[in-house]
Amino acid sequence: MWIAEDNPAAADALLAAAIAAARILQTRPKLGRVRLELAPERYRFWSLRGFPYLLVYDAKAEPPVIFRFVHQSRDLPAVLDL
């Protein structure tokens, strides 16, 4: 991860935020936002608090599966390719 090269503490905080989000979504998979302009309803989007990243996950999988970890400035339709 490039963040770790420039700022190891920020990289650790980002990893901790992603893990915390994954734990929340494991127990409550429908919390994420549906964005039909980007993906079918089964995929949901979760913003990582304090970071410009999204978790894109399959809320209907058992357990939920994180499909993408993506920076919000990216061209989401191109990156997701769903």
Image (cartoon, rainbow, N blue to C red):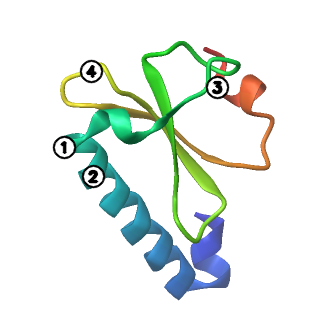
How far across and down, in percent of the image, does residue 38 sit? Answer: 67, 22
Identify residue type, mark 2: Ile
The residue pinned by badge 3 equals 80
The 10 Å Cα crowd at callout 4, few under 14, some 14 to 19, many 20 or more, is few
Identify residue type, mark 4: Ala
In front of the other: 13 or 1: 13
How far across and down, in percent of the image, does residue 48 sit? Answer: 52, 59
The 10 Å Cα crowd at callout 1, few under 14, some 14 to 19, many 20 or more, is few
Q: Earlier in the sequence, mark 2 or mark 4?
A: 2
Q: Are marks 2 and 4 in contact (CB under 8 Å)?
A: no
Asked if residue 21 lies left or right of residue 24, the reply is right
Q: Are marks 2 and 1 in contact (CB under 8 Å)?
A: yes
Work out whether 57 lies above or below 62: below
- Count of all numbered marks drawn on residues in the image: 4
The residue pinned by badge 1 equals 27
Q: In 3D space, how far apart are the residues under numbered discs 3 and 4 (Cα atoms)?
A: 17 Å
Q: Quadrant of residue 53?
A: bottom right
Q: Nearer the viewer, mark 3 or mark 2?
A: 2
Q: In 3D space, how far apart are the residues under numbered discs 2 and 4 (Cα atoms)?
A: 15 Å
Q: In 3D space, how far apart are the residues under numbered discs 2 and 1 (Cα atoms)?
A: 6 Å
How far across and down, in percent of the image, does residue 79 sit? Answer: 70, 30
Work out whether 54 lies above or below 82: below
Q: Earlier in the sequence, mark 1 or mark 4?
A: 1
